Image (cartoon, helix red, strand yellow):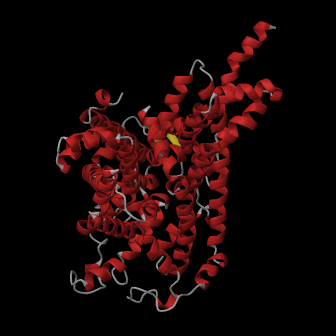
């Protein structure tokens, strides 16, 4: 009797935790395995596996004329978007942490881009950048910054040199709210008497910020930046909705390139996914090393 | 007393500073709301004035919003609702027992399980979309709502487990024991005592999953092919590609897809930050 119930006890975790493990295995683990497997397979356009392909998918991928520029662009994309996001959010967190009337409503407004679908935000920005009736273009014209509306020359998304900054802008726009909130949560954990002490010592404001606030904000900053790096590197809807990576592949990052390859050659696309995966892991490792995460947090 | 007076005095002095701070914050708040304002204004423009280069519509066409319901997009909204609702139910069914058990019991693979959940949170469907497609192709579930429910459920499980685990851990075991002693039974104690106390966490997990699934794009874009199985995001995106675009329908759709979500999100915003970052700090 006693032994039987002990045997049942050993199975107990399985009942409670098992379904979660099954769902993770089915939806997260299986696709990773399948992705790596597919990158070494020859798969027809209709999805039929035609046998092993060795490393041919990778060789074909690395030989793509656009591969190098796409990877380079992805790196710039991540560094620019995450860097700008963190800098702007540091400022905004400080601002929205001050006391002022209507703070609640102002903070609430900041949520909008975070809550809304990134795709919807990208669609609106595409519309606002419409060469003829786009709100942003109209403002630029009325400010005298561009001559006239209409035509391909006035299309900010038609050329990589103007499209890339706008894509980065939108990515920063949707990343700032979460980052600001995460930093505000970090600020809230800093005890007030620390500032009191600094004030007593007569430390200047920026000095207090630099040598007290920032170091104490570090755990929140690290986590927020890390989540951003992973989100931004895997970002897809902004570029997909606004430029499709065009003209050519001139605004495509690795995820866009992977998606376009998927329609032509799944094996090669899987190889691109694996490379993309590796890049995220390397970037994360570099970041954690640079921010000395281990000694500071864990 | 003197100190008190001094404090009041120094607080009322830098009034100009407060005004500047408030003004800056309002301007920034407006900037972040601006695209959604444009979305609403465009949705209310009469169709014939959509290509007019004016900032504001001359008249508001409220029938655009009702026109949405008779356009095919209403069916896509229904798909979105099914996917978001289905994923939310799935996540709650799976995450609640797992989070409760890991909060209350120390079992052999507890740490391994929590690490697995943490890793899941780092994974993004976009990064492995090819693998997801291959899997569901082999399962014969491509172009079904079920595949979307499964994927959305799986990828939002981590957040739900973390936040629920934190809530269950914060509820004293003694409360549950007391109810158990009163003869309600283990499950009775769980349902009558613990679950109600963890309600804020449950609601946060529920809303978060619902919104994430509601907004999801890339998985649906990949896994659904026939228009009647596509959620609103995919349907609206395919609108843009067409040359003759019924922009007012597109924007009416965007408003319907966006505004409720922003309001829902405002309810859980504080808890979401802790849920998203807590896992990584622990």
Residue B141 seen in this snapshot: no
Residue A142: percent from the left, percent from the top? 26, 86
Q: Quadrant of the C terminus of chain B?
A: top left
Residue B104's place in the image compared with B214, above or below, is: above
In the rendered view, does A204 fall on the left or right side of B35? left
Residue A293's place in the image compared with B257, above or below, is: above
In the rendered view, does A177 fall on the left or right side of A29? left
Quadrant of res A7: top right
Residue B3: percent from the left, percent from the top? 31, 50
Quadrant of res A249: bottom left
Residue A169: percent from the left, percent from the top? 31, 63
Residue sitting nearer the eye, A238 or B198: B198
Q: Residue at x 34, y 56 (%)?
A: A98
Residue sitting nearer the eye, A249 or B240: B240
Residue B126: percent from the left, percent from the top? 46, 49
Q: Residue at x 26, y 32 (%)?
A: A292
Counting every numbered tag in the picture gives 0
Residue B271 seen in this snapshot: yes
Residue A271's place in the image compared with A81, above or below, is: above
Q: Residue at x 26, y 70 (%)?
A: A159
């Amino acid at each position: 009797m006693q032994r039987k119930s002990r045997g049942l006890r050993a199975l107990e975790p399985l009942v409670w935790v098992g379904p979660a493990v099954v769902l993770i295995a089915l939806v997260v683990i299986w696709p990773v395995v399948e992705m790596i497997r597919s990158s070494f397979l020859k798969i027809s356009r209709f999805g039929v596996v035609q046998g092993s392909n060795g490393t041919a998918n990778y060789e074909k991928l690395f030989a793509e004329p656009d591969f190098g520029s796409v990877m380079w662009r992805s790196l710039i994309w991540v560094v620019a978007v995450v860097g700008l996001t963190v800098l702007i959010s540091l400022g905004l967190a400080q601002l929205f942490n001050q006391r002022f009337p209507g703070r609640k409503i102002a903070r609430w407004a900041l949520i909008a881009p975070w809550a809304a679908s990134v795709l919807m935000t990208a669609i609106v920005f595409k519309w606002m950048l419409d060469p003829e009736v786009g709100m942003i273009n109209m403002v630029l014209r009325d400010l005298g910054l561009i001559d006239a509306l209409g035509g391909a020359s006035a299309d900010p998304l038609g050329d990589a040199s103007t499209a890339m900054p706008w894509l980065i802008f939108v990515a920063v726009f949707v990343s700032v709210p979460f980052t600001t909130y995460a930093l505000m949560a970090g600020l809230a954990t800093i005890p007030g008497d620390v500032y009191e002490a600094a004030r007593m010592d007569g430390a200047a404001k920026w000095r207090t910020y630099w040598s007290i606030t920032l170091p104490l904000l570090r755990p929140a900053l690290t986590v927020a930046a890390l989540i951003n790096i992973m989100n931004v590197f895997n970002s897809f809807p902004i570029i997909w909705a606004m430029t499709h990576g065009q003209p050519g592949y001139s605004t495509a990052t690795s995820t866009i390139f992977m998606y376009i390859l998927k329609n032509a050659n799944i094996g090669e696309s899987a190889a691109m996914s694996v490379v993309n995966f590796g890049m995220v892991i390397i970037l994360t490792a570099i970041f954690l090393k640079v921010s000395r995460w281990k000694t500071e947090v864990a | 007393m003197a100190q008190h007076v001094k404090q009041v005095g120094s607080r009322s002095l830098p009034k100009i500073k407060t005004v500047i701070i408030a003004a800056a914050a309002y301007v920034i708040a407006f900037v972040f709301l601006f695209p959604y304002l444009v979305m609403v204004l465009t949705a209310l423009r009469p169709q014939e004035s959509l290509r007019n280069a004016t900032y504001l519509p001359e008249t508001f066409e409220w029938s655009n919003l009702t026109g949405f319901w008779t356009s095919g997009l209403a069916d896509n909204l229904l798909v979105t609702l099914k996917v978001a609702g289905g994923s939310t139910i799935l996540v709650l069914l799976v995450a609640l027992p797992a989070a409760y058990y890991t909060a209350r019991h120390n079992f052999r693979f507890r740490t391994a399980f929590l690490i697995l959940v943490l890793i899941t949170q780092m994974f993004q469907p976009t990064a492995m979309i090819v693998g997801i497609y291959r899997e569901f192709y082999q399962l014969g579930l491509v172009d079904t709502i079920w595949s979307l429910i499964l994927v959305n459920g799986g990828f939002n499980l981590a957040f739900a487990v973390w936040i629920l685990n934190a809530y269950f851990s914060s509820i004293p075991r003694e409360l549950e024991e007391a109810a158990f002693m009163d003869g309600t039974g283990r499950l009775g104690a769980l349902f009558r005592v613990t679950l109600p106390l963890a309600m804020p966490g449950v609601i946060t997990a529920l809303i978060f999953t619902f919104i994430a699934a509601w907004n999801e794009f890339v998985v649906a874009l990949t896994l659904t092919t026939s228009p009647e199985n596509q959620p609103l995001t995919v349907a609206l995106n395919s609108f843009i590609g067409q040359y003759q675009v019924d922009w007012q329908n597109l924007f009416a759709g965007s408003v319907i897809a966006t505004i409720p979500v922003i309001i829902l999100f405002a309810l859980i915003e504080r808890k979401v930050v802790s849920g998203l970052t807590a896992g990584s700090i622990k």
